[in-house]
Amino acid sequence: MKRQVFRILIGLLVVVAALAAMVGAGLGAAKDAAGSVYPGPMAATDEAKAVVDAAPRPRHDRALPTAIVVLGSEGTNVADALAPYEVLAVSEKFNLYTVAPERRPVPLTGGLDIVPDLSFAELAQRFPEGVDVVIAPDVTDAVDPVAAPVRDLLKDQLRSGATVVTVCAGAELLAESGLLDGRNATSNWLALYGLTRNYPDVKWQRDIRYVDDGNIITTAAVLSGIDGALRILERYADESVARKAAAAVGWTSYHAGSAAALPGSRIRPPDTVALLNVGYRDSAELGVMLTDGVSEIELASIFRPYTEFSYVARPHTVSLDGSPIRSRHGLTFVPRSTFGQVAGRLDRLVVPGSAAAAKDDPAVARAADAAGLDPVYMHSKDEFAFEPVVRDIAATTDVATATWVAKTLEYPLRSDLSGSAWPWSMTAKLLLIGLLGGAGAYALVFGVRRAVRSRPGLRRFVGHYVEMVLAMFAGMGLLMLPWLFIWPGISDHAVIHTLVMAANMTIGMAGWMAFRGHARRMIVEMSAAMVAPFLVLLVPLAAGAISDGTLMLAGHGLMFLTMLGAMLLRRQDYTHHHAARPWRKPATVDEPDEPDEVRVLQDTH
């Protein structure tokens, strides 16, 4: 029986080691890939300020209602923002503005930087009584303090009588403020897994393009924002205007008068391709040539599909001379580089826009040829802008990734996809890493087993270490329960949560050492060794050199090493049996009777 249990434990250890190896090998790449989706804002240089000052503002027609598209200061989903913007723009039925907390270049998905038309302060000054329509796309860190100005703006505009349209996960901006409590709403099918748990008072609905609940319209994933904007046109104009706008942007899924049903997206086994991509794909360095006259949806079709949730490319926004460009409906976009500055590290160069494809600028061709690149004009056919991009992802990566991209966009593909069915090379790499991790754990276990059998001291040393590790996890699990009762939101405060976990583990370990009869000095030393990594890492955390997540991962990893180091410094104490436990009275041993001669000698003295 003991042998069977041992074999089961060894099997579990090998499986865990294999999984840990696969996850660990992909963690660094995953963090880097996810971080590249929303690069930080551009530096506030004199050149950037000059670009902002020179960017023209839209003309205002008092006879038209006013709509705004709200942008976050740290990052906004490019398709959530630009797709509804273009729908309203082509209708010519609104004064239309992009607004952000400050009037400076702000990043959209993939590092596309836009100059907002107005700051929040300028908006309040121009429209003190509020606007008519507010488009609220998904912004980064929607529940954090950095997004508080956006949440406050939405509350103020609702109070002033505006109709708010949230796009995709932008619904969380309203949910976090309690503005959706008791109301019907929808969101991105993937985001709904978390939203339904975090905001149970909202009547969340799935599998529908949008939910019209009076002064709040919430839409499903990404491109459903087009339907939200078309619904606004139905309200403020009529269905014929909405139908023309849908045709103008190539959106064939328009459902007049009501929201269309969606196929019911859920997490499925093929969707694991996203995990392979984020952890193991070598993302292509993709140059994106910005040119005047490109439509807003054409830009969005490049920067969203290749980046967020697919991680197949890292875009670099360029123009031939680094100058900003004006989109078809008057938005100003700022490239981060000239083409020459980054040409040497690009794998591909794409040129979005049907206008650019029609022009086929010889200067672009010469620059690309000098860099050994063949420019790809993505929008050379008359079709919805996202269609050729999804086809390109299938052809250059694999069909599984392209299908996943369309699913996250909630976009019904019109084309047959061709290309490799699955990323087989990445799958083989993943399995090989898992096999090596499992084999290493198996070899380690049997190596240690053989060593401890022949050396009783080593066996006791390893036994002590394993006992203390188990006591650590027991302390973490048991002592965290009252914390969750006292402070249910502790997990939202990453640093405090990490330090409390470390303290709980230390208490569990110290209690076990006391139970095992270790000296007080050893317990104090081991406790200090466990806490030390976290205290040391607080310094680079305060300096901004590491993140909250790094504090947790690195702190716990180093804890095991510092524990081992403390044991090695006193290895004699950990390789021998300990005295009886403090609360257990030692058994008395009868001393042998002394000989009569000894007693006589003692009495004479």
Image (spheres, helix red, strand yellow):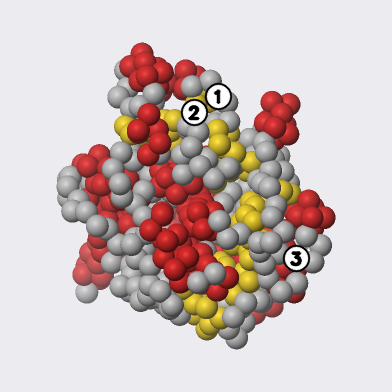
Please give the name of the residue rendered at 75% of the width and 72% of the height, measured from the top-left corner: 160
**As drawn, is 150 to the left or to the right of 79?**
right
Q: What percent of the width, then of the height, locates residue 35?
A: 51, 44
- Residue shown at 26%/64% (left/top)? 269
Tell me the residue that label 3 is attached to. Answer: 130
Gap between marks 1 and 3, in whole Å? 37 Å
Q: Which of the marked residues, 1 or 3, is nearer the chain's N terminus?
A: 3
Relative image position of residue 146 (x, y in whole percent): 69, 54
Quadrant housing residue 55: top right
Q: Residue at x 40, y 33 (%)?
A: 356
Query: Which type of secondary structure does the marked residue at label 3 adopt?
Result: loop
Count of marks placed on residues: 3
Residue 208 spot, x, y in % from top left: 40, 75
The residue to which callout 2 is attached is 318
Residue 4 visible from this viewpoint: yes
Q: Is residue 82 above or below residue 490?
A: above
Q: Which residue is mark 1?
A: 322
Given the image, on which type of amino acid does mark 3 rest? Gly
Residue at the top extreme?
Answer: 370
**Labels 1, 3: front one:** 3
Asked if disc 2 and disc 1 are in contact, CB closer than 8 Å, the reply is yes
Q: Would you identify the image quadrant in which residue 11 lies? A: bottom left
Outermost residue, front side: 63
- Residue at 49% x, 28% y: name it: 318
Residue 574 in view (yes/no): no
Towards the viewer: 475 or 111? 111
CA separation in Å, label 3 and label 2: 37 Å
Question: Is 142 placed left or right of 187 in the picture?
Answer: right
Measure how far apart labels 2 and 1 are at the Cα level. 6 Å
Amino acid type for the residue under numbered disc 1: Gly
Upstream in the sequence, badge 3 or badge 2?
A: 3
Dot label at residue 167: none
